[in-house]
Amino acid sequence: MFPEEIGRARSVNRKLKELITAIKIENTYSKTEILEAYLNTVPFLYNARGIEMAARTYFDKPAAKLDVLEAATLVGMLKGTYYYNPVTNPERSLGRRNVVLGQMRKHGHLTDARFKALAKRPLKLRFERQLDRSGRDNHFTAYVRKWLLEWANENDYDLELDGLVVETTLDAGLQQAALRAVERQASALQAVADVEWANSWVPGASSTATYTAMRPSVKPFDYYWRTHGDQLDAFVRESGEYRRAVEGGETPAAALKRLKADRDFLRTLKEAKSRLEAGFVAMDPVTGEVKAWVGSRDFARDQYDHVAQAARQPGSTFKPIVYGAALESGIPPEQTYTDTVMDFDMGNGKVWRPTDMSGTSGRQVTLREGLVHSKNTITAQVMQDVGLPSVIKLARNMGIRQSKLASVPSLALGTSPVTLLEMVNTYATIAAQGQYRKPVFVRRILDRDGKVVADFASVAPERALSQATSETLIDILRGVVTRGTGTAVRYRFGVTGDVAGKTGTTQNNADGWFILMHPNLVAGAWVGFNDNRVTMRSNYWGQGGHNAILLVGDFFKTALDEGKIDKDALFPGGRKPEPVRVREEEPEEEYDEAEELYEGVPADEPVEVIVPQADEAVEVETVPEEELAPPPPPPTPVPSPLF
């Protein structure tokens, strides 16, 4: 209280002022009045400040109607709202609630019998998040709010009372373009998943319009649930309803049978598991400012943030880091490697054997072509030449600073989970000629008088890799969008600026990625299901070059058409490509899901094949191909890449 009068400096003078103020308050107000003032200002998370809003948030009732258990739960949060949050930490909250009840017994407000009876009662919430005052809360504002709370605590500010003005970096026009792209393209991809998993046969169409037209006439995911009975049982056993039933004394078998017979429960569970999700983020590589952020298809339905919170395997989008480490070590882009399956000794009789579903040619392939066509066989050899420590160090320097990177050979193929924000930040470092900038989402903070109290826009960048290496990587990744797996941004969306990017897909089509670099903007998208045991059915639609690329291409088309980014901007050494014929919908064609194209086990669970070797057996870890190239669009075919 009274921050302006007392001051914010961490000093003895301030402590003396606080002591005098506390004495004056105690002499002026009663204990009840002081407690009332405190309870009306304390934050209870989820945009709830004060006991009244807390009661409505956690129990969906006014504070006057709270019972003793509910009141004790909220009082228990006061010691640490995050630590004793009843939503995310129910066990801790329950224990703290009982401590409060114990104090009530100690001071004569509860009898021993009443205390024992109440302490046995389970924690029951009717949680309902209160809307932000603007009515437009989203993943970006939620992320900024959490960061602001930490900043305010560290700098002794009260976000509610100090009248601070927070300037964020989000661009309204680009944010709207991102929201439309995610809504439009993710809905189309949901139709693809719904139709492909509806029947035993797969339509085999390459146009989203075909699936959108078929969607009303099928039962979404019907075939999936009929053929994945064990998985459905696992989903039921993992549900909160099942856990509470078993904890309440019901036998596991009885609980499973009852819940599977509950149509409403089963429908809700299936809808949640079969809902396709997406994340999208765009940032300015020159300043590090975040310009667009979409954490899921619908914030009201899914608050889980697929930009900064969800960590997923990046697949081949990680490969530029491996090739960047090679270039930094002095390996030239024209260095050749043999396109063949090789064994890499991992010690203890284990051998790592990365492969490509497109097969191997046995010919010499340059480092440049290995990245353009995303060859696993070449990438593994490149990583062996530069070493894991160099790759991990460069990844950290370029932007992957939160997620843990496993020091295993398969890291080169993107098997360590990372966030979308980290990957886009990494590509922003490449686009910024090797200069790393920490993502900026708050530009500056002003007080009520307009005085700047914090400025985050002028932080000096860090040199992560050389400008020469960055220019070479950009030039190589141009090839991905002109003749590799990212051509859809040109022939479908007409993006003709100087752009470079990379697609990524993980095993069983669990994750689809695409990141595109422009001199003014870097944007990336992830597509998949929250539970990675549910995946896209066909390899065609499971690839980042056919799913995530739609979101990024849609966004960039709008950004260019509306003049949000300069269509004539060039990277160093770049030149504007020739215009292409734009199609509203990808040209329809039939494709075959040939048996040899099906991917095997997830990348983090490699197949171990026992190969007899004279008197001993060697364990071989086979890593299947990650991505397929998009089909060449008629009438101007694009050469089919090897990947």
Image: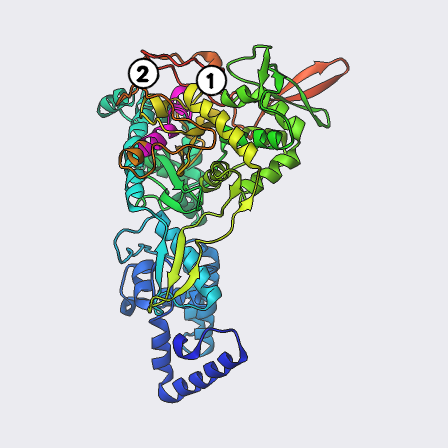
Residue that numbered label 2 is attached to: 203
Residue found at x 49% / y 53%: 459
Give the class, few, some or many, for how many residues have Cα within 10 Å of label 2's Cα (few <14, many ≥20): some
Residue 303 showing in the rendered view: yes
332 vs 521, left or right, is: right
Magenta stretch bounds: 537-556
Residue that numbered label 1 is attached to: 598
608 vs 641, nearest the viewer: 641
Where does residue 424 sit, x and y in percent of width and height? 45, 38
Under mark 2, the amino acid is: Pro
Q: Is residue 540 magenta?
A: yes
1 above or below 303?
A: below
Q: Main secondary structure of the magenta part?
A: helix
641 above or below 514?
A: above
Under mark 1, the amino acid is: Tyr
Earlier-in-chain disc, 2 versus 1: 2
